[in-house]
Image (cartoon, grey):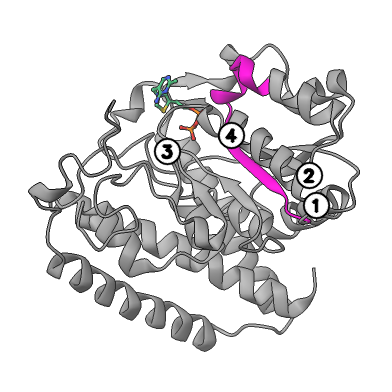
Amino acid sequence: MEDGKLLRQYEVMLRERYFVLEQCTQNSKGKIHGYLHCYTGEEAIAAGICADLNPKDSVFSTHRAEGHLVSMGARFDRMMAESFGRVDGYGKGLGGVMHMSVPEIGLVHSNGVVGGGIGLAVGAGLAHRYRKDGGVAVAFFGDGASSHGVLYEGMNLASIWKLPVIFVLENNGFAISSPATKMISIADVARRADGFSLPGIVVDGNDLVAVYEAASTAIRRARAGEGPTFLECKTYRTRGHNEGDPQWYYRTREDVKDWEQNRDPVKRCKALLISKGLLTEEKDKAMVDAIKKELAEAVAFADASPYPGEEYLEKYVWKEQ
Ligand SMILES: Cc1ncc(C[n+]2csc(CCOP(=O)(O)OP(=O)(O)O)c2C)c(N)n1
């Protein structure tokens, strides 16, 4: 990973981290409607996968979408407004925090239906191939979603048709309170890709460089017409499943502390940049301060935006004529 890109993607990770922390603050004030699922601890995956994607590609996200949105270049102010259910949000406040779509930057859809993006990404891959536009479709999903049948139907179709699709499993070890070790019959889900004749790669999902290297190979393959790749990124979410999750009955504070202190992707990348002479504490602080300023402006923008009015009640509702 070239130095300039490493520094840029570190900044993307900072943006992911601080955006979500600001959402938590706003959520505690009651301003966010619907469940807030934080991406905290998983930032290297989105920043590494999206680094070489562009608005002509098709990314399908999950209920834990903010990292993917930020990494594709979504604006803080419009994301915050959507989180608040306001009319200046990306979905005019009608989608809310779990359903942000920004197709103009390549983030086609985020989805509260677990596994809901997988089939859509395979369809988008087929569309890219038909149009010969060089686009790549990416499906992000969790370990819980990886047990859904659509993944295996999707891998089979993508493989036989050599579609430009990248399946990105964000294996954070839990589906709500169910540990992956108890719910999945194999240590590395990536091995299941062998059965569909596509590369199944296991990556340390908290290592930005490792995720990036694996993603850039997969993207090159897809754009060259060589077909799909399955990437299993091993990671850990350091906040609860959603804000308010009474999490201490299925995991320990010690485990969370261990991941935060020793495997945090943001800290790891910062240490790497400092060791390479690409970052100083002062430069880091300046980056964080600029992000916090942009966030304060985003909150003010969202606060000032009205809720959608009555005119929206039936506007986007399909009606039989
Ligand atoms: C089809 C469907 N079933 C159940 C749910 C309820 N639900 C929301 S999140 C979740 C767990 C998802 O776990 P995983 O796929 O591992 O993603 P993570 O939350 O760990 O990122 C479940 C079961 C849902 N939203 N959609």
User: What residue appears at the point 55 percent right and 34 percent down from the top-left corner?
Assistant: 117
Under circle 1, the secondary element is loop
User: What residue appears at the point 50 percent right and 88 percent down from the top-left corner?
Assistant: 282
The answer to whether the residue labelled 2 contacts the one labelled 1, judged by CB atoms less than 8 Å apart, is yes
Q: Quadrant of residue 240?
A: top left
Disc on the earlier residue, 2 or 3: 3
Residue 171 is at least partly visible in this image: no
Above or below: residue 224 compared with residue 158 = below
Marks 2, 3: nearer the viewer: 2
Residue 11's spot in the image, x, y percent?
Answer: 55, 72
Task: Give the extent of the magenta segment.
Answer: 134-151
For the residues marked 3 and 4, what is the alpha-carbon distance in whole angstroms? 15 Å
**Numbered label attached to residue 196:** none
Residue 290's spot in the image, x, y percent?
Answer: 40, 83
Marks 3, 1: nearer the viewer: 1
Q: Which residue corresponds to mark 3?
A: 63
For the residues marked 2 and 1, what is the alpha-carbon distance in whole angstroms? 5 Å
Q: Which residue corresponds to mark 4?
A: 120
